[in-house]
Amino acid sequence: MINANEFVEAARELGFSRYTGVPCSFLTPFINYVINDDTLEYVSSANEGDALATAAGAAIGGQRSIVMMQNSGLGNAVSPITSLSYVFRIPFLIITTHRGQPGVKDEPQHELMGQITKELFDIMRIPWEIFPKEANEIGPALQRADKYMKKEQRPYAFIMEKGTVAAEELKKNPVKDITKRKIEVRNYQKTNAELIDRNTALRQIIEHTPEKDTLLIATTGFTGRELFAIDDRKNQIYMVGSMGCASSLGLGVSLARPDLKVVIIDGDGAGLMRMGNFATIGSYASNNLVHILLDNEVHDSTGAQATVAANIDFAKIAEASGYSVSLTGNDIQLIEDLFSLEGHDGPVFGHLKIRPGTIENLPRPDVTPNQVLTRLMQHIKTSF
């Protein structure tokens, strides 16, 4: 058995300062130690996929990151593992617990995942090893992980068995109290107005996101492809998968780089898929994060099947989640005003209704995801 500080401090020596995750009783000493230490940073995510994407965003921003989860949560993380960290080549450390480990008594819901955890990492092409159980094993294990991540620019995993880490008392509340934050909602609804198209909205956003000090993250599907078609700039990331994770990736970057304005362009389908991240952004993000949701009420790139967005008030969700300002409506002036806000102490949200459809002969990016990320990181002067 080891103490939490023995691993965390050894990891700190290699530059790991950002932790994200969803708790498991096996991980409790670890999480408590990180939360107790004011020089380390922890984000408690709503689900494991968002935790992983936030760790990826922090890594892009120059903070070496560790994401922690119960192995049952690997299912939630499969999409960002396979279509975000793999295709973009983003390295971070994964610590997953081994609930349901064969031969160890556990709850019935962990039985199958306990049997397939190691194979699941193999299938996702993530090298893994058993989390070190003795202090003298920690350094060599971290060196192996570090060597792999630097060479391959992909994640490495530790599987933590029961009873590996000694108890650690939680001494403080890890989440900032935002209940007294000033919250504002503005309505930009025009009666009987013709909805604008996505292309018009994106062009307006580009006008307010200069390369010098902003980073623009576009959700998967037509949004990223249209953004590329309008202007392929080095401060832009086009999500090609991991639907719904643009906002959690953006959160990670914004925390690592408070000097940059991080602008997230979401869609209604993506926003619905990872709605829990609204709450995480509200609690953890600062005023350098701008979250825009372009809502055409359909899954446009798969045939325009309806989402449930017509029945949802996204601005109220952002308001309830602690965003400092939320603008909503169908007037393009909303975008102009969103980038003119001053005096707010938290993230801001813009919900713009647009019409379905895209431009003719919509191209796909002719640069690979890794090329996009490499030039962006060179632009903002970070590295893995």
Image (cartoon, grey):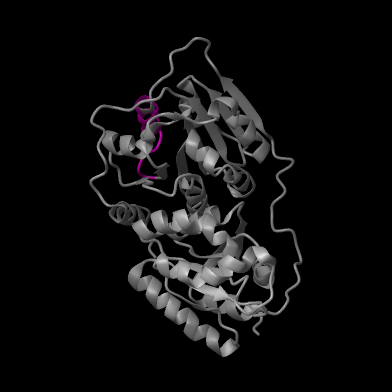
The residue lying at 74 percent from left, 40 percent from top is: 180
- Residue 310: % across, % down: 55, 25
The relative height of residue 324 versus residue 144 in the rendered view (above or below) is above
Q: Nearer the viewer, residue 117 or 189?
A: 117
Q: Nearer the viewer, residue 261 or 221?
A: 221
What is the magenta range? Answer: 199-212
**Any part of residue 70 in sight:** no
The residue lying at 42 percent from left, 70 percent from top is: 122
- Residue 83: % across, % down: 39, 54
The residue lying at 51 percent from left, 53 percent from top is: 252
- Quarter of the view holding residue 231: top left
- Quarter of the view holding residue 99: bottom right
Q: Nearer the viewer, residue 303 or 321?
A: 303
- Residue 108: % across, % down: 67, 65
**Any part of residue 296 in sight:** yes
The relative height of residue 173 versus residue 160 in the rendered view (above or below) is above
Q: Residue furthest top?
A: 192
- Characterize the magenta stretch by its predominant secondary structure: helix
